[in-house]
Amino acid sequence: MFGNVFVVMFSKFKKKNMKKNSIHNEATSANDTVDENLNEATVVEPEVESQPDETTETASESDVDEEVDAQSKLEKELEETKAALEKEKKEYLFLMADFDNFRKRVLREKAELIKNGAEKALKGILPIVDDFERGLEASKAVNDAESIRQGMELIYSKLVKYLSDNGVKAMETTNAVFDPEIHEAVAMVPAADESQKGLIIDTTQKGYTLNDKVLRHAKVVVAQ
């Protein structure tokens, strides 16, 4: 009897375990199904409507304004440069015209100076010519040679002074050392002694300088 009771209890316990295992298996299966469905499901994120970036639009408008201002500034500078260039061009043309007139005037004055350069010198000699004419006229009625000589000396002194006032001076050649730059040797004679060699002992024609420049070479005789 005790064995029958044990069999009955074991049978109930086995059925209870089988029922528990069945419930557990069903729950596990259900969980697996839910997991598979979750894995297969596609998560759809809500679309977010894009909104314009106010900061970007403000920056773009600022860049455009800066470009417009820069272009306006460049155009203004270009106009100012053109105006300054035009002004300088006109001033340059005026300057060139003035210089051309000045050049022509200088050339004309130079030509007149060359043409009439001797006017002053010749005009200064005319009073001396007048003195010679008066002296020649007076010598016709005078038989005194000394008086004529004195008159000629006066005229000569007046002429020499006039030449000196205009920079013309006679060269000093007496006992001077021969210098081929200002002297012209017309003859060579033996020297009386060694101290006279290379010296000028006679002058056949005076030499003259004009403002320290040779106007006419002196013709001299040199001892050798």
Image: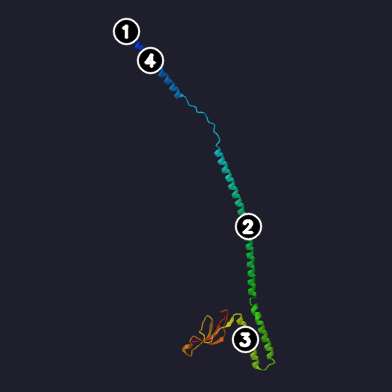
Q: Amino acid at mark 3?
A: Ser
Disc 4: CA contacts within 10 A as few (<14), some (14-19) or many (>=20): few
Badge nearest the viewer, 4 or 1 = 1
**Residue assigned mark 1:** 5
The answer to whether mark 4 and mark 1 are in CB contact below 8 A is no
The answer to whether mark 2 and mark 4 are in CB contact below 8 A is no
Badge nearest the viewer, 2 or 1 = 1
Q: Earlier in the sequence, mark 4 or mark 1?
A: 1
Q: Earlier in the sequence, mark 4 or mark 3?
A: 4
Secondary structure type for disc 1: helix
Badge nearest the viewer, 2 or 4 = 4
Corner quadrant of residue 115: bottom right
**Residue assigned mark 3:** 157
Disc 2: CA contacts within 10 A as few (<14), some (14-19) or many (>=20): few
Q: Position of residue 20 (x, y in %)?
A: 38, 15
Q: Earlier in the sequence, mark 2 or mark 4?
A: 4
Outermost residue, bottom side: 143
Separation (CA) of disc 2 from disc 4: 113 Å
Quarter of the image that includes the N terminus: top left
Q: As drawn, is 218 to the left or to the right of 5?
A: right
Q: Earlier in the sequence, mark 1 or mark 3?
A: 1
Separation (CA) of disc 2 from disc 1: 135 Å
Secondary structure type for disc 2: helix
Q: Is residue 45 above or below residue 170?
A: above
**Residue assigned mark 2:** 87
Rendered residue at 65%/82% (across/down): 125
Corner quadrant of residue 38: top left
Q: As drawn, is 178 to the left or to the right of 82?
A: left
Separation (CA) of disc 3 from disc 2: 65 Å
Q: Amino acid at mark 1?
A: Val
**Residue assigned mark 4:** 20
